[in-house]
Image: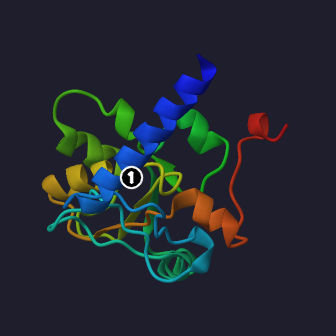
Amino acid sequence: MVRQAIILLLLAVVLALAVNAVSPNSIPYVGKWRELSSGEGPVIPPEAEEGDPPFIGIEVARMEHDQGEALFVDAREPMEFACGTIPGSINVPFDYLPPGDLGQYFDSTLGVPKDHPIIIFCSGEECDLSLHLARNMQAFGYTNVEIFFGGSREWAEFGEPLERSPECEQ
């Protein structure tokens, strides 16, 4: 019985590999993923679309942070924000946006003109909250929005400090 199951499993694997090899929509066996730590330009998510705000890499994020003019916005939930964010950032959690007029909410929460430089981020490649928040802000007239898709994870991997709430220090 076990022998038959192993034979069936091997036949299924061989058949799947053969179908994948001839399929026009084949799936690569080995992905070509860029390491976050390479610093080779911005991380751009596969779901990015034409018209999205521009994506920036760690080099630009560092420069903008050092200059101190851009507003850094963390799109993650409040607990993640409290436990490690880019210093000086404010929290606008995408998953907790209020119903109603988001334009008025953004204006009062951000407290900057609509053409002020804004850099939105979340935790990194596994998080698309920054992309969605940036799209919403752009739809409400914010014209100088950029996305740092490498987020707090890439920031930390490059040796930059994270700001943490005392409750998260343990």
What x and y, as percent, mark residue 11? 44, 39
Q: Residue furthest top?
A: 1
Judged left or right of residue 138, residue 20 is: right
Query: Residue 131 versus residue 161: which sits nearer the camera?
Result: 131
Q: Considering the image in quadrants, where does the C terminus appear?
A: top right
Q: At x 52% / y 60%, what residue is drawn? A: 151
Element at label 1: helix
Q: In front here: 110 or 84?
A: 84
Task: Tell me: residue 167, above or below residue 67.
Answer: above
Residue underneath mark 1: 17
Left of 115 or right of it: where is 78?
Answer: right
Q: Is residue 92 visible?
A: yes
Q: Residues within 10 Å of mark 1 (few under 14, many from 20)?
A: some
Residue 5: give x, y in percent of width and height. 54, 24
Mark 1 residue type: Leu
Q: Is residue 56 left or right of residue 33?
A: left
How far across and how far down the image is residue 119, in percent?
40, 65
Residue at x-position 23% and y-position 63% = 114
| Whole-percent x, y for residue 82 in the image | 63, 41
Which image quadrant is residue 28 in? bottom left
